[in-house]
Image (cartoon, rainbow, N blue to C red):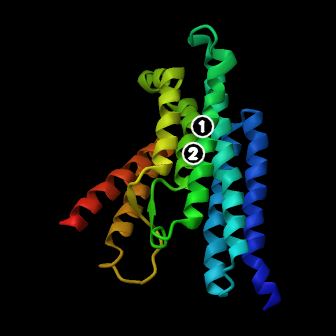
Amino acid sequence: MTIKKHIPNLITLLNLFCGCIALVFAFNKDFEMAFYFVCLGIFLDFFDGFFARLFRVSSPLGLQLDSLADMVTSGVVPGLVMFQMMISHATTAPAGYLQFFPYLGFVIALGSCYRLANFNIDTRQTDSFIGLPTPANALFILSLPLVLKYTDSIFIVELLTNPWFLLVLTVLSAFMLNAEIPLFSLKIKKFSFKENTLQIVFLICAFLLLVFFRYLGIPLLILFYVLLSVLNNKVVKK
């Protein structure tokens, strides 16, 4: 029993470890490796809660550790990536941009911190989410430099190298993290197609988007997730 008690917390710490490694790659502008380590951290973040429930060893310590690890992996890393993107394209910005604007990328980290702290005390978010989850937001932000790297679209290149557009994305990101918008959870608690239709439809669409659009499919997928949640909210209200 003692060993089982520590397994979820160990997985959470591995999530934090992945976030720290991702930070190093992000500092060196190796966005692809940073993306992969954040993905691994998010994968571990899912399983720490899974094993905590499986072994029935959920604890207040585990809850706090989870948020602290997520703050690095899904909060600081995307903030740093946005900072790096903004500072890389400072030449297209007005005078004074280099000294000030790129640091606004860390607004994403601030928004993530507020959301994670609020999540721990918000009793409404047990079976669903209020606002965009930090892992989803992190994937959205970290996919941007990869979309830029592998795209052939001049329009997308112009957008993702425009510092003002990046600033708008930063503010929108922090807003969506804390917006009072109910979003459905991907957790499947009962093996019933009827009760999990929304999740199954989303997973099928996710697979298709990633297969056909690769990295571009990730931001499209996050946008689809939000729109599908809003549509589902309207249907439920009726």
- Residue at the top extreme, as displayed: 95
Circle 1: residue type: Val
Give the residue displayed 72% in from the left and 36% down from the top.
30
Identity, as a three-letter code, of the amino acid under mark 2: Gly
Is residue 143 shown above or below 28?
Answer: below
Q: Is residue 109 above or below residue 101?
A: below
The answer to whether the residues at label 2 and label 1 have Cβ atoms under 8 Å apart is: yes
Q: Is residue 133 left or right of residue 82?
A: left
Q: Is residue 167 left or right of residue 38?
A: left
Q: Which mark is residue 107?
A: 1
**Residue 162 visible in the picture:** no
Q: Picture coordinates of residue 92 (x, y %)?
A: 56, 12
Residue 92 in the image: above or below residue 44: above
- Disc 2 from disc 1: Cα separation: 6 Å
Residue 235 screen position, x and y as percent: 22, 64
Which is more toward the observer, 58 or 55?
58
Residue 222, position as x, y percentages in the image: 44, 49
Q: Quadrant of the C terminus?
A: bottom left
Farthest-out residue, right: 2
Which SS class for mark 1? helix
Residue, x 46% and y 81% (percent of image)? 189
**Residue 166 point in image, percent of width and height:** 52, 28
**Is 232 placed above or below 28 here?**
below
**Disc on res. 111:** 2
Provide the secondary structure element on which disc 2 rests: helix
Given residues 174 and 185, the one toward you in this image is 174
